[in-house]
Image: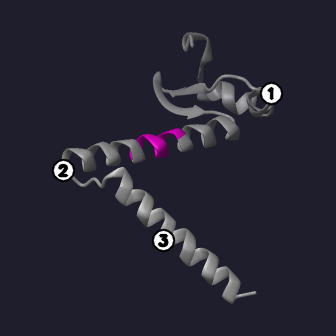
Amino acid sequence: MKYASRIKPISYLKANAARVVRGLAEGGEPLIITQNGEATAVIQDIASYEQTQEILAMLKILALGEQQVKEGKTVSTAAAMRRFREQVKRTKVGTRAGE
């Protein structure tokens, strides 16, 4: 992505807010807003923001998993499957009891 064409001063945003929002909603690239010549904000559409947040959450989960592996906090596949089957059984029993 080429950011140079997406950098605008805050005065541009003030004068063209509706156009900026419309462009973002139509799949436009994020807009970098400057104030006194310094980049101070990024404006993006909600779908892109949500996708970014989901990706960050997944990366955090991956990092946590890697750390747990480094610390030896792992279980064998067989043990994991046993736990999974036990949870499924408990769920089925709980569902039947609540019918």
Query: Left of 76 or right of it: where is 16?
Result: right
User: Residue 89's image quarter?
Assistant: bottom right
Q: Is residue 46 magenta?
A: no
Q: Which mark is residue 52?
A: none
| Callout 3: SS | helix
Q: Which mark is residue 26?
A: 1
Image height of 89 relative to 61, above or below: below
Rendering colour mode? one colour
First reached walking from the N terminus: tag 3 or tag 2: 2
Q: Residue, x 55% and y 43% (percent of image)?
A: 54
Q: Which mark is residue 86?
A: 3
Image height of 38 relative to 43, above or below: above
Q: What main secondary structure does the magenta stretch of the protein show?
A: helix
User: Residue 97's image quarter?
Assistant: bottom right
Residue annotated with mark 2: 71
The region drawn magenta spans: 55-60
Query: Left of 49 or right of it: where is 28?
Result: right
- Of residues 39 and 58, which is closer to you in this image? 58
